[in-house]
Amino acid sequence: MTLSHFKKGDTVEIIAGKDKSKRGKVLEVHPKEQILIVEGINRVKKHMRPNPQLPTGGIILREAPLNWSKVMLVCPHCNKNTRIGIKVLSDRKVRVCKKCGEIIDET
């Protein structure tokens, strides 16, 4: 299984594509496919036929999956987009910011 550097709720910055330099919160992470869904980023129009949740049908905007090679995590301490390191402290693994060296959280 592939190790994911991203978690649900992280803030990320887009580094490539039509939404470059925008920031958003991670809604879903799929490590096996190496994709994630970011709030307000990579929005696409979806044509929906009528159903019980949407009785009239119509066109809705929703977030499409994005490859995680196009995003970088934003460090909550230095507020910059950064690469992530993994450190082992005693018996647990923690994510570490490569720019400021601060611990982001436990993995």
Image (tube, grey):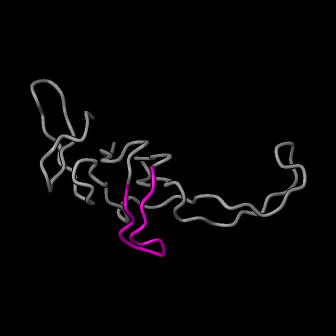
Does residue 104 appear to the left or right of 99 in the view shown?
Answer: right
Q: Residue at x 88, y 53 (%)?
A: 50
In the image as oriented, which residue stretches furthest toward the left? 90
Image quarter hosting the C terminus: top left
Does residue 22 appear to the left or right of 85 in the view shown?
Answer: right
> Magenta region: which residues?
12-25
Q: Determine which quarter of the picture holds residue 34.
A: bottom left
Q: Is residue 51 above or below residue 58?
A: above
Q: Is residue 7 above or below residue 82?
A: above
Q: Residue at x 26, y 36 (%)?
A: 105
Q: Is residue 46 magenta?
A: no
Where is residue 27 shown, x and y percent of the image? Answer: 50, 46
Q: Is residue 89 above or below residue 28?
A: above
Does residue 94 appear to the left or right of 8 in the view shown?
Answer: left
Q: Is residue 19 magenta?
A: yes
Q: Residue at x 11, y 30 (%)?
A: 89
Where is residue 98 shown, x and y percent of the image? Answer: 15, 54
Q: Determine which quarter of the picture holds residue 12.
A: bottom left
Looking at the picture, tell me which residue is in the foreground, 103 or 16.
Answer: 103
Where is residue 106 shown, x and y percent of the image? Answer: 25, 33
Q: Residue at x 84, y 49 (%)?
A: 54
Where is residue 29 shown, x and y percent of the image? Answer: 45, 46
What is the number of callouts on the image? 0
